[in-house]
């Protein structure tokens, strides 16, 4: 979850910025060509796609980071070891609350 959120956030940021720059550059140009409407439309799609990726990626990154910390703390509570000492032979399970 955290990695997916990070990738979506980075890709969304790049798309958002690219779309915004494309729209601004095309709309402020001094000449009008048939392809300028195509550039504005593509910039708009990149802008909206970037906003959607940012909107999905940031919460995924936050929730994934929170769950990762909880699972790491939970895994630290359980340990399995083999006792090789002459007085205590066998397998030991330890669980901390």
Image (spheres, rainbow, N blue to C red):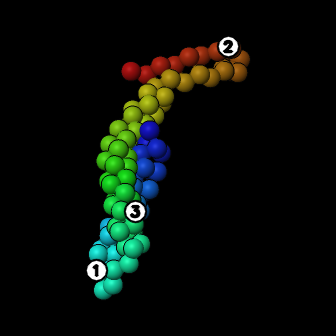
Q: Position of residue 64 (x, y in %)?
A: 40, 39
- The vertical placement of 5 against 41, above or below, is above
Marks 1 & 2, CB-CB < 8 Å contact: no
Query: SS at mark 3?
Result: helix
**Residue at x 59% of width, y 16% of height:** 92
**Residue drawn 33% across the image and 80% down it:** 32
* Residue for badge 1: 28
Q: In the structure shown, which secondary structural element does the residue marked by tag 1 occupy? A: loop
- Residue 42 numbered tag: 3
Q: Most extreme residue toward the bottom, as rendered?
A: 30
Q: Residues within 10 Å of mark 2 (few under 14, many from 20)?
A: few
Considering only order in the chain, which callout, 2 or 3, is on the residue closer to the N terminus? Answer: 3
Numbered mark located on residue 90 in the image = 2
Report x, y in % for residue 8.
Answer: 43, 49
Work out which quarter of the rendered image holds the N terminus and state it: top left
* Residue 68 visible in the current orientation: yes
What's the CA distance linking mark 3 and mark 2?
Answer: 67 Å
Q: Reading the chain from its start, which is encountered first: label 1 or label 2?
A: 1
Image coords of residue 26 (percent x, y) = 34, 75
């Amino acid at each position: 979850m955290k990695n997916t959120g990070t990738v979506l956030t980075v890709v969304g940021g790049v798309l958002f910025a690219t779309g915004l720059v494309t729209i601004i550059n095309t709309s402020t140009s001094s000449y009008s060509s048939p392809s300028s409407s195509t550039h504005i439309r593509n910039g708009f799609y990149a802008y909206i796609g970037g906003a959607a990726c940012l909107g999905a990626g940031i919460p995924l990154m936050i929730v994934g980071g929170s769950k990762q910390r909880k699972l790491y703390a939970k895994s630290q509570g359980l340990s399995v070891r083999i006792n090789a000492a002459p007085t205590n032979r066998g397998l030991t399970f330890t669980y901390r609350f």
